[in-house]
Image (cartoon, coloured by chain):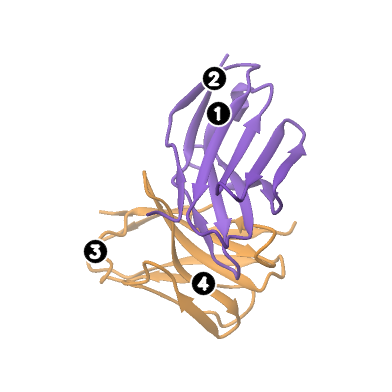
Amino acid sequence: DGGITQSPKYLFRKEGQNVTLSCEQNLNHDAMYWYRQDPGQGLRLIYYSQIVNDFQKGDIAEGYSVSREKKESFPLTVTSAQKNPTAFYLCATEITGNYGYTFGSGTRLTVV
Amino acid sequence: QKEVEQNSGPLSVPEGAIASLNCTYSDRGSQSFFWYRQYSGKSPELIMFIYSNGDKEDGRFTAQLNKASQYVSLLIRDSQPSDSATYLCAVNRGGNQFYFGTGTSLTVIP
């Protein structure tokens, strides 16, 4: 089955710790995205990548980092510089701008 | 001004009624428009997209686009309890980035 796999589903982070969220796709889509969803704020773009070894900052990139070493994978690292990381993180892919996103199942990150 | 605005609701309709969800957008150059459904605790799933003025129907769902007035709506006919979810409107201005509204919560009452 083609799709997007995000792992883990739930993640707990201690203060000052870096954590990495995994996103893997077998849809052969070029573009991949990371969004953050907070209650009442909708989806906000963190980073996106349209091609391997290239990525751009979104609206809220501070405190996050990404890599795109292969087409199938776009991991997101939440660094200790991100002061309010508790949120639902969504990875998405798409073919072009006209057909919409396909979303992964999400990772719920909580600071403990 | 936000890129995309939606009434957060909650919107409640009885089972079998028509649910009407509305969305406005700020950039007149926006090119494509999308509706996603998101169940509580789950990720969004695409249900409709529309590019041209007018109506587009898919089963019980109809998307309506009016570029002159900069609004897009989603009608759900014969609403079912399984339609209870948050509906997100998204707009593409060209390129790969989409802008999302905050969503409208819909409850269908049996």
Which residue in the rendered view is the most extreme toward the front? Answer: B68
Question: Residue at 56% across / 86% down in the picture?
Answer: A53
Question: Drawn colour of chain A?
Answer: orange
Q: Secondary structure at mark 4?
A: strand
Same subunit, tags 4 and 3: yes
Q: Is residue A109 visible?
A: no
Q: Amino acid at mark 2?
A: Val
Height in image: B51 above or below A23?
above
Same subunit, tags 1 and 2: yes
For the C terminus of chain B, the image quarter is: top right
Q: Nearer the viewer, mark 2 or mark 4?
A: 2
For residue B13, which numbered disc appears in the image? 2
For the N terminus of chain B, the image quarter is: bottom left
Q: CA distance from mark 4 to mark 3?
A: 21 Å
Question: Drawn colour of chain B?
Answer: purple
Q: Residue at label 4?
A: A48
Q: Are marks 3 and 1 in contact (CB under 8 Å)?
A: no
Q: CA distance from mark 2 to mark 3?
A: 40 Å
Residue nearest the viewer, comparing B12 with B6? B6
For residue A83, which numbered disc appears in the image? 3
Residue nearest the viewer, comparing A52 with A94? A94
Q: Is residue B69 visible?
A: yes
Same subunit, tags 4 and 1: no
Q: Residue at label 1?
A: B84
Q: Are marks 4 and 3 in contact (CB under 8 Å)?
A: no
Neighbour tally class for label 1: few under 14, some 14-19, many 20 plus, Cα within 10 Å:
many
Q: Amino acid at mark 4?
A: Tyr
